[in-house]
Image: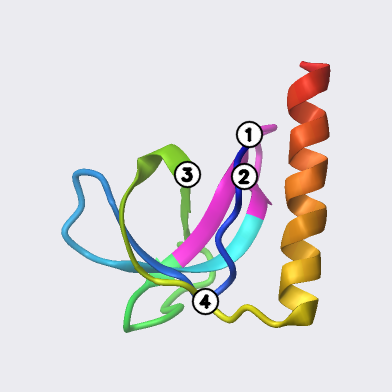
Amino acid sequence: MKKFLPIGSVVLLKESQKRIMIVGVKQKQANSDKVWDYSACLYPEGILDPEKLFLFDTEQIERLYFIGLQDGEGLAFLNKINHLDDNADTTN
Protein backbone atom coordinates (compact mmCIF):
# COMPACT_ATOMS: atom_id res chain seq x y z
CA MET A 1 0.00 0.00 0.00
CA LYS A 2 1.42 3.35 -1.10
CA LYS A 3 1.13 6.33 1.22
CA PHE A 4 1.35 9.72 -0.43
CA LEU A 5 3.33 12.64 0.98
CA PRO A 6 1.55 15.93 1.72
CA ILE A 7 1.86 19.05 -0.39
CA GLY A 8 4.94 21.04 0.59
CA SER A 9 7.12 17.99 1.21
CA VAL A 10 10.70 18.44 -0.02
CA VAL A 11 12.47 15.49 -1.62
CA LEU A 12 15.55 14.57 -3.63
CA LEU A 13 15.05 12.21 -6.56
CA LYS A 14 17.45 9.43 -7.45
CA GLU A 15 20.26 10.58 -9.77
CA SER A 16 19.45 14.22 -8.98
CA GLN A 17 21.34 16.96 -7.18
CA LYS A 18 18.56 19.52 -6.74
CA ARG A 19 15.75 19.22 -4.21
CA ILE A 20 12.14 19.67 -5.29
CA MET A 21 8.93 20.53 -3.41
CA ILE A 22 5.72 18.59 -4.00
CA VAL A 23 2.90 20.80 -5.29
CA GLY A 24 0.47 18.14 -6.55
CA VAL A 25 -0.59 14.54 -5.93
CA LYS A 26 -1.88 12.06 -8.57
CA GLN A 27 -1.07 14.27 -11.54
CA LYS A 28 -2.05 13.39 -15.12
CA GLN A 29 0.52 14.20 -17.76
CA ALA A 30 -0.72 16.46 -20.57
CA ASN A 31 -1.24 14.67 -23.90
CA SER A 32 -0.91 11.27 -22.20
CA ASP A 33 -2.85 8.80 -20.10
CA LYS A 34 0.06 8.52 -17.65
CA VAL A 35 -0.79 9.48 -14.06
CA TRP A 36 2.21 10.28 -11.91
CA ASP A 37 2.24 10.14 -8.11
CA TYR A 38 3.46 13.74 -7.79
CA SER A 39 4.19 17.04 -9.47
CA ALA A 40 6.83 19.32 -8.01
CA CYS A 41 8.76 22.54 -8.46
CA LEU A 42 12.34 23.46 -7.66
CA TYR A 43 13.16 24.12 -4.02
CA PRO A 44 13.64 26.85 -2.81
CA GLU A 45 12.93 28.70 -6.06
CA GLY A 46 9.30 27.60 -6.43
CA ILE A 47 7.30 27.54 -9.65
CA LEU A 48 9.36 29.47 -12.19
CA ASP A 49 7.27 28.31 -15.16
CA PRO A 50 3.91 26.56 -14.63
CA GLU A 51 4.45 24.67 -17.89
CA LYS A 52 7.62 23.04 -16.49
CA LEU A 53 6.76 21.07 -13.37
CA PHE A 54 8.54 17.84 -12.47
CA LEU A 55 6.43 14.67 -12.65
CA PHE A 56 7.60 11.61 -10.72
CA ASP A 57 6.54 8.49 -8.84
CA THR A 58 7.22 7.50 -5.23
CA GLU A 59 9.84 4.93 -6.28
CA GLN A 60 12.02 7.72 -7.68
CA ILE A 61 12.46 9.42 -4.30
CA GLU A 62 15.93 8.95 -2.85
CA ARG A 63 15.64 11.15 0.24
CA LEU A 64 12.90 12.94 2.16
CA TYR A 65 14.02 16.30 3.61
CA PHE A 66 10.75 17.73 4.89
CA ILE A 67 7.18 16.54 5.33
CA GLY A 68 4.62 19.17 4.30
CA LEU A 69 1.70 20.52 6.29
CA GLN A 70 -0.45 17.86 7.94
CA ASP A 71 -3.71 19.39 9.10
CA GLY A 72 -7.21 17.90 9.13
CA GLU A 73 -8.08 18.96 5.59
CA GLY A 74 -4.79 17.75 4.09
CA LEU A 75 -4.86 14.44 5.96
CA ALA A 76 -8.47 13.81 4.86
CA PHE A 77 -7.45 14.47 1.24
CA LEU A 78 -4.45 12.14 1.43
CA ASN A 79 -6.56 9.47 3.12
CA LYS A 80 -9.05 9.67 0.24
CA ILE A 81 -6.26 9.53 -2.38
CA ASN A 82 -4.60 6.59 -0.61
CA HIS A 83 -7.94 4.75 -0.44
CA LEU A 84 -8.69 5.38 -4.14
CA ASP A 85 -5.18 4.27 -5.10
CA ASP A 86 -5.53 1.05 -3.04
CA ASN A 87 -8.82 0.26 -4.80
CA ALA A 88 -7.25 0.89 -8.22
CA ASP A 89 -4.41 -1.51 -7.36
CA THR A 90 -6.86 -4.31 -6.54
CA THR A 91 -8.79 -3.89 -9.82
CA ASN A 92 -5.70 -4.10 -12.03
Which residue is disc 3 drawn over?
58
Which residue is disc 4 drawn over?
68
Q: CA distance from mark 3 to mark 1?
A: 14 Å
Question: How many residues crowd mark 1 within 10 Å: few (<14), some (14–19), many (20+)?
Answer: few
Which residue is disc 2 drawn over?
29
Residue 73 occupies quadrant: bottom right
85 left or right of 55 in image:
right
- The secondary structure type at the circle numbered 2 is loop
Query: In the rendered structure, which segment of residues is drawn in magenta?
Result: 26-40
- The secondary structure type at the circle numbered 4 is loop
Q: CA distance from mark 3 to mark 4?
A: 15 Å
Identify the disc placed on residue 34. Answer: 1
Which comes sooner in the sequence, label 4 or label 1? 1
Single out the mark in the foreground, 2 or 4. Answer: 4
Q: Quadrant of the N terminus?
A: top right
**x, y percentage for residue 43?**
33, 76
- The secondary structure type at the circle numbered 1 is loop
Q: Are marks 3 and 4 in contact (CB under 8 Å)?
A: no
Q: Residue at x 58, y 71 (%)?
A: 7
Q: Residue at x 80, y 45 (%)?
A: 83
Residue 82 vs residue 92, the one in the foreground:
82
Which comes sooner in the sequence, label 2 or label 1? 2
29 magenta-colored: yes
Which comes sooner in the sequence, label 3 or label 1? 1
Q: CA distance from mark 4 to mark 1?
A: 25 Å
Which comes sooner in the sequence, label 2 or label 3? 2
79 left or right of 28 in image:
right
